[in-house]
Image (spheres, rainbow, N blue to C red):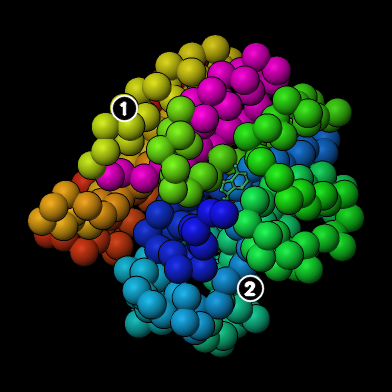
Amino acid sequence: MLAYRHAFHAGNHGDVLKHLVLGEVLHHMAEKAKPYSVLDTHAGAGGYSLEGRYAGKKGEFEGGVASLWNAQANGRTAWPEAIGRYLQLVRDFNGGPGAKLSQYPGSPAIAQALMRPGDPLHLYEMHPTDERILRAFLGARPHTQVHLCDGFASLTRELPPPSRRGVVLMDPSYELKSDYGKVVAAVREIMTRFVQAVVIVWYPLVQLVEAVQLPKRLRSAAAAAPKGWLDAQLTVQAADARGFGMMGSGVLVINPPHPVHGMLRECLPVLADHLSQIEQPKWVLDAGLK
Ligand SMILES: C[S@@+](CC[C@H](N)C(=O)[O-])C[C@H]1O[C@@H](n2cnc3c(N)ncnc32)[C@H](O)[C@@H]1O
């Protein structure tokens, strides 16, 4: 049984980076009338309370979504458009204008908010409790399937989607070291089956050889993508004295919609500024666009 529960981490700096990118990708996918599918291979519970004992245990959201939310509440309104849209999504999930920050939308909730009713959504989650919560939350959405099974294995069944337009979000917990190899193999598989897929892979920045090698391996697996890739990293925390702990995270976007590059260039310094818990936060944006 997997021990990881995303409820402990919901709304942290990693979620902010990942969900900003996911929101912008889906925003641009909806600019064409033709339907598109989303495969969320590691979906989690869908949405999270920030007031319960899980999120409250370490308060990770305080250094994540709450930093942006509080800056806005304290008068900052001049955000890059994409950060404004992200905050709007979070506000809507909390009930709209004047709401207090008490809940956080996971990737399925963001997909639900931005996809059109006819766009198919496939959600995979292996933890039975989170899968049950997810099914209760989104199981009734039209054209939506919630699966209690291995999201990596779903790719061979579901790709390419009938519409030949699709987004794959791969957001493993990396609780098992084998996830590092599996996510690279999954990108290779996607490139074989559906090379036009827009693929978003989130990964942690931790001091582990598998994690350090991952960005290079992912880029190389993405080499066949007709529009290339973007790789954004944000370092906002220090590891502990023994070298443990997540220092930040990265997002690789394969075949990114054109505006995502400029969006990241504009937003990464703002995120580094607001989410940093260290004196010298760092952001990196590498591009292998074609
Ligand atoms: C980082 S969380 C997902 C968070 C979610 N994508 C979001 O952004 O809101 C990773 C999830 O993957 C689940 N999981 C782990 N291995 C899996 C697998 N092979 N297939 C599907 N889900 C898996 C875990 O139970 C956990 O809920």
The residue pinned by badge 2 equals 92
What residue sits 35% from the left and 82% below the top? 74
Residue reaching furthest front?
1
| Picture coordinates of residue 6, whole percent (x, y) | 51, 62
Q: Position of residue 186 (x, y in %)?
A: 58, 27
Residue 209, located in which quarter of the rendered image?
top left
Residue at position x 78%, y 52% in the image: 146
> The magenta stretch spans which residues?
182-206
Indicate left or right for 220 with 283 as reference.
Answer: right
Q: Residue at x 40, y 70 (%)?
A: 61
Please give left or right for residue 188 compared with residue 241 in the image.
right
Q: Percent position (x, y) of residue 244?
A: 22, 52
Label 1 belongs to which residue? 213
Q: What amino acid type should be assigned to the residue bearing mark 2? A: Asp
Q: Earlier in the sequence, mark 2 or mark 1?
A: 2
Q: Residue at x 44, y 43 (%)?
A: 176
Report the quarter where the N terminus lies: bottom right
Asked if residue 250 is positioned above or below residue 49 in the image, the reply reads above
Q: Say which of marks 2 and 1 sits in front.
A: 1
Q: Secondary structure at mark 1?
A: helix
- Vertical order, 221 against 169 (above or below): above
In the displayed structure image, the side of residue 115 where residue 184 appears, left or right = left
